[in-house]
Every structure is written in structure tokens, then in C-alpha cells.
Amino acid sequence: MAERWTPRSDPPARRRTREPDAILRVRDLHVYYGQSHAVQGVNLTLEQGVLSVVGRNGMGKTTLCKAIMGLVHSARGSIRFNKDELRGLTPSQVANLGVGYVPQGRRLWPSLTVHEHLRLCERGGKRAAWSIERIYDSFPRLAERRNNGGGQLSGGEQQMLAIGRALLGNPHLLIMDEPTEGLAPVIVAQVEEMLLTLGEEEDIAVLVIEQNIGVATAISEKVAIMVNGRINRVMDAIQLAADRELQQRLLGVGRHGHEDVPLPEEDDEEFEETEERPRRASRRRRRVSAGPKVYKSNLQTPTRWSMPASLAEIMLASGISADAGADEVPEGLRASASAITQISGGEILVVGTLDTKGPELRFIRDQISRAGLRTRLVDLSTSGKPSGADVPPNQVAAYHRRGPGGVFSGDRGESIREMAVAFEAWIRQQPGIAGIISAGGSGGTALVTPGMRRLPIGIPKVMISTVASGNVGQYVGPSDIMMMYSVTDVQGLNRISREVLSNGASAVIGMVRSRRDSGRAGEPTDDLPAVGLTMFGVTTRAVQQIAAGLEDQFDCLVFHATGVGGRSMENLVDSGMLAGVIDVTTTEVCDMMFGGVFPATEDRFGAIIRTRLPYVGSCGALDMVNFGPLDTVPERYRGRKFYQHNPQVTLMRTTAEENDRMGRWIGERLNQMEGPVRFFLPEGGVSALDAPGQPFHDPEADRALFSALEQTVRQSSKRQLIRLPNNINDPEYCEAIVSVFLTLLGRRVDRRRTRKARNAAV
């Protein structure tokens, strides 16, 4: 049975065990590449000093670094640096907060000298802890090579420069991805010494991603082991260095021919204890002597400039077919799988099929470029013709779950459908998109708009289309795509098409500039977290009262429960833009199940299931199915109870049998939610029309709905049904929802505020 909710005084403050202060705290972090779940609920804490993260290739270590730095999008979770939340920030914003990054592969400019590299990165003025002079003092070899280009340096010198470049940002946290990869042993020893110095003598914490067990255990007290996208365990470095079986089982390393790894004679002097550093030297000797000799199995690991390849892509590059053989891929699309281009941020995407709309798309690109904004030309052609785009078709197709072979099947219709799927997966992984524009006919519109819908609300989206003068609901969906009618066909440049394409380009230019100039292109300027609410005409009073009770602590976003409204709210949930949901009005389920005109999709509640967002729901307007004018009601419903809301909208009362079906369907969806869930059952009626004395008042039908929910929902401490004797619009009911929602989110319940909202409703 659902619990009976009774108002109570403010609960005493919960006693929480306060976690110790930490410079970096990662909680439940998830990152996807297309369909691949690369980072799976990582929890990691770095309080101070040096923490090593070790693991085999492909375990998600580099992706973890990129997620912290904002270089890849994380689906959910938290990344806190000191007291700042990093998730959702751009790489430049993360760096400005005091996080330095030494990427795998160093990534230097070959044409710039050592000194030019350092001058580009110097910040903080004369009082900064790290200056160019100090970098030269710490790395004398760089001083000697100050006028040499980045491409003229050895691997060790490049690593010194990459580290020096990061230190000039004067970070409080330094993230280093494979700092000893490919270095000679003498240089590895220097890097070890420098990391120890930073962790022990400087006000810098260091997170090191390393495959070399000897290095990892030498530089840190604790080592985190990453397996299949998760932190398997965090253990003492000494224990890991001595546990050969664990190394073999989790990391795949072993010994070759001898059990002990003695230090070379020339290292004895290097590790000799001195008065200046007795503790550090003894610790290093102890760990290195206990550690195994490591042999790397993959010397060509990905860099931050490359996309982690799908299995299908790797097989294709190796000449092995996953689903479609390499011979089936058109010749013009057989490009190197390593030549993957990622959007670097702040660019407007010009997207379409260059094989048929090339002149038009390039015209749009040139208009935007002349306005001083950066563009990326993305080609979604499936014909196999060579592409001169910034992002050619094979790079987008690589994001398909079956790789390029899943897109280029030889069947034009199937290829277009699958390219749309690949483009959706591709665009979700591109950070910092400033806007997107496309032009095409019905096929091009259907190809591009699903990817547009994947972008967060607010990013400018312009679709110039031959079908924009008709019903565009299937293309726009729950997003904010601006559809512009092309007037003439999108086929060649003429006096009309130039005018229309120029206007479309000007529209996206203006929107991007407006967002940038107003500061809306970055993080939301409103400090209040956003919460989504669903409303219908018959639940308006309830939503108004709930919003009034929350407005001091939340930015309340109200969505009209017309099918598209619910999808729009869940789109924001998937985008990570909402802190919670108060789903007062679930009426879209009625129309989905019984043929109404405002239906939900089968994925209703899906975003809540995927994100585990705090959820408070109710049975709002589950007493009605929506139809158009009375003469449009299906014949099978003749003789039912109807209410004409207006000449264009006819409402049909649901029966006890229909309510039983809805209750069981909703209950099964609630069972799939793993976050905190509270679902309210208003015994006094689920809408304004279901109140006593109103046309749809039917206690028997409501009881069937509530009973089905109680029989279906598996209640627990996280998932609860709450019965109240009130109508859904009653002040007491709304006050209870506000109180429960605030409690779920750990917020203070302001009784004065809820009373004020209640009095306003009365």
C-alpha cells in the first residue's frame, strides 16, 4: 500500500558524515562514445599529493582525463575541483579554475620554438609561482634548446616542454596522461623525481595516468586500478608493487625470466639518501625495488586529438569485416581511421550532403566566415564520392554502432537512414558547438534534424528546407529548431536561393553572436538549479502553487503536457540541464495508449530512468483522452462520456479498465527508475474535472488506477507511492509535493513560503 503522507514540522538536520576536503572528487561519472560506455560510474578522490591511475589499454583512463578537462562530454555524474563543479565547463574554463593538463603524446606545435611555446602559456605575472625562468631552472635542457622548434626536440625534451607548458598556468591540480610513454629510462627517472617534488614540496596535487607499474608505485602512496571503465580498487602502492598475481590479473603484466629486478649500478648514486631528501629517496628505492619490470603491449595509444575507435572501425582498418566487408565500402570513403576530426569548440557546423548540395552549403559557410565566425563543414553524403569537407562522411559513419560498414550498404534509402543514426551519435560527442545550420530537401531534412535535436536547448539550429511550409512536427520534435522555407528547391544558386540562404546564414550568425555577447553561450547565468514541471489546463492551479513554493530555490520550467511538451522536458533531463522533475501531469500516457491527439512515446519516463534524476510524479489528468472536434472521435468510442473543452478539443473520460492498464504501464516504468522516486495519488480527483460535482468525477475509475499502481510498483526506501485524500489542485496536496521534493534534494522546507503559496491559491 502507498504510505499516508501527513504534514509535519521541519525535520531535524540529518547527520552526515562529512567527507574530508579533497582537491578533486569524481562521483558516478559516465562517458559514452556513441553506443560505447567508456567510463562507467567512476568514483575517485584526490586529497593531496600524487595519485596514480593504472590499467590496461582501453580501460577508460584517457577518457577520464578528457572528461575532467571538459574535452569530452560526460553523460552524468559529478566532477568537483575544490568547491567548483567542472562537469559541463569548457576546457578553457576548467584551465582558468587552476587545472593543468599534460596530454598523452605531448601535442606540441612543430613550427614554434621552445621559448614561443612557453610565452604562449605564461600567466600570473611576476608574482606567479611558476615563470619561464623557473621552467628553465627546473629543465636546463629546455634552456639550451630554447630556440629549437617543437619538431626538433627529442621525446624527453618534448615531455619536459609539455610539463613546463602546463606548469606555467600555475595550476593547483596537474593531470598527466602517460607522462613516461616512450621515454628513455634516464628521462623516466627525471620525470619521477619531478613528480615527487611537485607532490611533496609544491602546492600542487597531481593525478597521473600511467601504465608503467614501477613509475606509478614509485611516485604515489595510493594507486587506483581501472578496469573496464570503472575504478576496481584503490590500494597502497607498496602492496600493488609486491602483489604480482594482482598485477597479472588486473593489469596483464608479468615477469620475464627472473623474479627480482635489481637496480642498475648507476642508479645507486641517484637513489642515495641525502640530508635534503632522506624520506623521498628511501621511499623510491623501496617501491622501485619491489616493482616489476613492465613490457607495454601497445605503443600507439590514442591521443587527445583522436577518437577512440569502435570495434567495427578497428576491424575495418585491420582488413577484417564486422558486419560488412571492407570491399563493400565505397572507394572514396576508405580514409584512414586515425584521421578523425573533432570539433575544437566555438564553431558553427554547416551540415549536409555535399555531393548534391555542395554549392549551397559552401555559400552558407562563406557567408558565416565573412562575418568573422568559425565554421566546420560536415559532409553526410552516402554516394562514395570524394569529399573536401572538414569532417568527411567516413568520420561521421565511424560513430555508427556497426562502424562505416553499417552505413555504406549500397542501398540509398538504408544508407541515409543509418547515416542519420551515425550523425546523432557523432554530434553528441562534439564539445562546444556554437550553432548549426543545414539546407536540403525532404531527405536532407530527415537526415540532419535528428542530430540537431540531440543538441541542448538554446544552441542555435537553423534548417532551410523545401518542406518547412508544411507540418514540421516530425522534424522539430521537442527541440528549438528554426525551420525556414527555401521557396525554390535547394538545387543550385540563383537570385531567390541566394537571398534565402543568406537570410538563414544571417539568422544563425545573429543568434550565435547574441548568445556570445550576452554570456549565454557558456554556463547558465541563473544561479538557481532548474526543475521541470508538467502542466495541463486542468492541473494549472496545482503547478502554479508548486512553482510558487519553489521559486526562491529553483528555476521552474513548466512544460505543457501535449506530447511534445513531455518530450521537451525529458530532452532537457537527458542533456543534464535539470536538477529534478515534478511530473504533475502524466496525461500524455492516456493519449498514447488510447489514440488521443497529444500522445507520449513509448520512451515516456525514459530520461528519468537513464539519468536517475530525483523524480516526483502524480496522476495529473489521467482521467481524460484528448481528441479534436467531436466529429473526429473514433467510432469505437461513441457513447462514452465526453466534455467539449472548446470547439476544437474534445475530452473523453477514461474507464476503470483503461485506468487499470495505465496504472500497470506507469508502475512498470517507475520500477525501472533507480533514483529517488515519489509518486502521489490524489484520492480527491486527478484533475479539475475529476473533483466532486464535476463532469469527470468517478471515484471507482480512480480507485482502479491507484490499485493498479500499488499492485505493480515495487516500493522501497527510494521508490514510494504516497496517497493523499485531496484533489490534485488542492493547496494541501501541492504543499505536500513541495515538501517531499525539497527533502529529496536536501533542501530546506520553508513553511512560510508554502503557506504563502497556499494562501495565494485560495
Image (cartoon, rainbow, N blue to C red):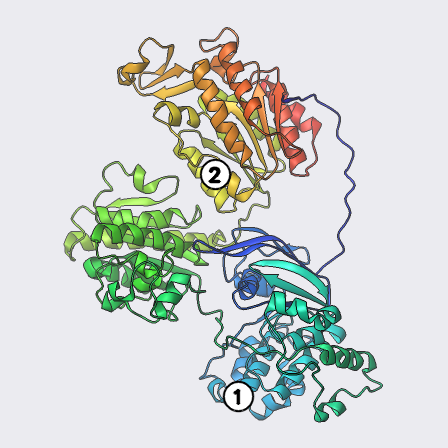
Dot 1 corresponds to which residue? 154
Q: Is residue 476 above or below residue 284?
A: above
Rendering coords of residue 343 (x, y %): 41, 63
Q: In the rendered view, does 454 fall on the left or right side of 252?
A: left
Quadrant hosting residue 703: top right
Quadrant location, the C terminus: top right
Q: Residue at x 58, y 39 (%)?
A: 674
The mark total stands at 2
Query: Which of pointers 2 and 1 indicates the residue nearer the eye?
Result: 2
Q: Secondary structure at mark 2?
A: helix
- Residue 296: percent from the left, percent from the top? 55, 77
Q: Residue 757: in sight, yes or no?
A: no
Q: Amino acid at mark 2?
A: Gly
x and y, in percent, of residue 588 in the image: 42, 27
Q: Quadrant of the N terminus?
A: top right
Give the alpha-carbon distance from disc 2 to disc 1, as whole Å.
52 Å
Q: Is residue 534 above or below residue 653?
A: below
- Residue most extreme to the front: 257
Please name the residue that numbered disc 2 is placed on: 606
Residue at (64, 85) in percent of width and height? 133
- Residue drawn at (21%, 53%), measured in percent from left and top? 412
Q: Nearer the viewer, residue 271 or 441?
A: 271
- Of labels 2 and 1, earlier in sequence is 1
Q: Residues within 10 Å of mark 2 (few under 14, many from 20)?
A: many
Q: Is residue 509 visible?
A: yes
As drawn, 549 above or below 428: above
Return the mark for residue 592.
none
Q: Is residue 691 above or below residue 316?
A: above
Front residue (pair 68, 32): 32
* Front-most of residues 91 and 552: 91
Residue 586, image x and y in percent? 48, 27
Residue at image location 49% in from the left, 13% down from the top: 701
